[in-house]
Amino acid sequence: MGKCEICGRENVSLLYARQKDSNSLVKMCQDCWRKAYAENRLVSGSGSSGGCCS
Ligand SMILES: [Zn+2]
C-alpha cells in the first residue's frame, strides 16, 4: 500500500512499472498502470514483480 506517483491517490496497492519516455521505475496504482499499458507507454515485461533475466 502506498501513494500513486501518477494520480497521487493514497492507500492504493501499487505496481512498479518502467516508463518508456523516462526509463524510470514508477510506482502507480492499477488504474494508472492499466491506462499507461493501454497507451503502450510502459516497457514491455516490466510489471509488479519485476522478474529476472531481462
Ligand atoms: Zn494512480
Image (cartoon, rainbow, N blue to C red):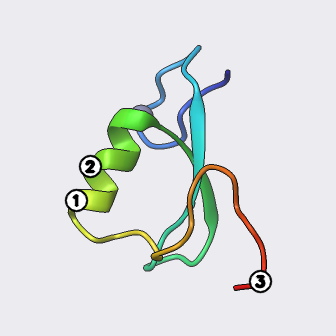
At 47% across and 22% down in the image, what residue appears?
9
The quarter of the displayed image where residue 2 is located: top right
Which residue is tagged 3? 53
At 62% across and 70% down in the image, what residue appears?
24
Mark 2 vs mark 3, foreground winner is 3
Residue 35 got which mark?
Answer: 2
Residue placed most toward the observer, 33 or 10: 33
Quadrant (top left, top right, bottom left, bottom right) of the N terminus? top right
- Label 2 to label 1: alpha-carbon separation: 5 Å
Q: Amino acid at mark 2?
A: Lys
- Is disc 3 placed on a helix, strand or loop? loop
Q: Position of residue 23 (x, y in %)?
A: 57, 78
The quarter of the displayed image where residue 6 is located: top left
Of mark 3 and mark 1, the one earlier in the sequence is: 1
Above-or-below relation of 41 to 1: below
Using residue 37 as the reference point, say whether residue 16 is left or right of it.
right
Of mark 2 and mark 3, the one earlier in the sequence is: 2
Using residue 4 as the reference point, say whether residue 34 is left or right of it.
left
Using residue 25 as the reference point, say whether residue 52 is left or right of it.
right
Q: Are marks 2 and 1 in contact (CB under 8 Å)?
A: yes
- Is disc 1 placed on a helix, strand or loop? helix
Above-or-below relation of 39 to 54: above
Mark count: 3
Disc 1 crowd rating (10 Å Cα; few below 14, some 14-19, many 20+) is: few
Q: Amino acid at mark 3?
A: Cys
Q: Position of residue 29 (x, y in %)?
A: 47, 34
Which residue is tagged 1? 38
Which residue is most to the top?
11
Q: Amino acid at mark 1?
A: Ala
Above-or-below relation of 51 to 15: below
Q: Position of residue 46 (x, y in %)?
A: 56, 67
